Amino acid sequence: MENIAKKLNESAPELLIKKNESLAKYTYTKTGGNADLFVMPKTTEEVQSVVQFCSEESVPLTILGNGSNLIVKDGGIRGIVLYLDLLNTVYREDTMIYAGSGAKLIDVSRFARDESLTGLEFACGIPGSVGGALYMNAGAYGGEISDCLHKATVLTTKGELLHLERADLAAKYRHSTVAEKKLYCSRSSVSIRAFRKTTHRSKDGRTDRSTRIETTA
Ligand SMILES: Cc1cc2nc3c(=O)[nH]c(=O)nc-3n(C[C@H](O)[C@H](O)[C@H](O)COP(=O)(O)OP(=O)(O)OC[C@H]3O[C@@H](n4cnc5c(N)ncnc54)[C@H](O)[C@@H]3O)c2cc1C
């Protein structure tokens, strides 16, 4: 593994690489053995370098989200574990929220609330990452991530970049094409509706105490 770490560092010099890292720190159950190599990319380009490297060098690659839907055995994971926690940027453009795949779904849901955007309320209690949610089409209370997905940037196992639209996700109950085709998600945009509160004036010109919700597409 020493040799593989050295080669990986040559192809992605800025990449954070940890050797023999305990995965118990990163799983929801706080259990599990060590990863031979544990890498934390900061950009989609770094994710791509790692995926291409693993494909070319035939190194096993495992992607770890928030670790809330998997159990790591005590013997750990051989090869490279790709942890996307640093790809956690969340920002808004108009009524669209863009989120890195390592962003926590709960944080994205809270961000939407703070920005007065509606559509992600169902996700406020799901303890996963955005990438993990797309992998299994996470959902609750009658909503699921495929309902509000706009686009997702994913990589094939060979490291080719693809842009998936909502229909490409082929979402079913707790299943999607990300799991089916073994894709790696690095960035997604979640399309959600915006609302703003307005004050309603009654016919006599007085301000109504109640607020009206205007919805824009
Ligand atoms: C207390 C609790 C409550 C829960 N409630 C719900 C619920 O209400 N609804 C629901 O749907 N689920 C629920 N879950 C399950 C879990 O939160 C979801 O499955 C979540 O989507 C898993 O995301 P994760 O990031 O933790 O994935 P992980 O557990 O880290 O990984 C799960 C799978 O996804 C893959 N994966 C992770 N990230 C990516 C990525 N970026 N690209 C490609 N593949 C990736 C992994 O390789 C792995 O195969 C709950 C779990 C717990 C522990």
Image (cartoon, helix red, strand yellow):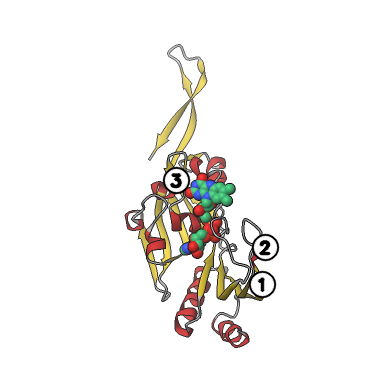
Residue 122 pos. (x, y %):
49, 41
- What residue sits 46% from the left and 19% below the top? 201
Q: Quadrant of the N terminus?
A: bottom right
The residue that label 1 is drawn on is: 21
- Image mark for residue 102: none
Find numbered disc 2 in the image and state the secondary structure of the residue it sits on: helix
Whole-angstrom CA distance, mark 3 to mark 2, is: 35 Å
Instruction: Characterize the local packing of mark 3: few (<14), some (14-19) or many (20 or more) Cα atoms within 10 angstroms.
Output: some
Specify the quadrant of the image occupied by residue 193: top left
Instruction: Characterize the local packing of mark 2: few (<14), some (14-19) or many (20 or more) Cα atoms within 10 angstroms.
Output: some
Residue 177 pos. (x, y %):
37, 60
Residue 105 visible (yes or no): no
For the residue marked with disc 3, what is the amino acid? Thr
Whole-angstrom CA distance, mark 3 to mark 1, is: 40 Å
User: Is 105 located above or below residue 209 in the figure?
Assistant: below
The answer to which of 117 and 62 lies nearer the viewer is 62
* 28 left or right of 116 in image: right
Contact? badges 3 and 1 (CB < 8 Å): no
Q: Residue furthest toward the front?
A: 74
Contact? badges 1 and 2 (CB < 8 Å): yes
The residue that label 2 is drawn on is: 25
For the residue marked with disc 2, what is the amino acid? Lys
Q: Residue furthest toward the top?
A: 204
Residue 137 pos. (x, y %):
43, 52
The residue that label 3 is drawn on is: 95
For the residue marked with disc 1, what is the amino acid? Glu
* 29 left or right of 122 in image: right
Which of pointers 3 and 2 indicates the residue nearer the eye? Answer: 2
Specify the quadrant of the image occupied by residue 19: bottom right
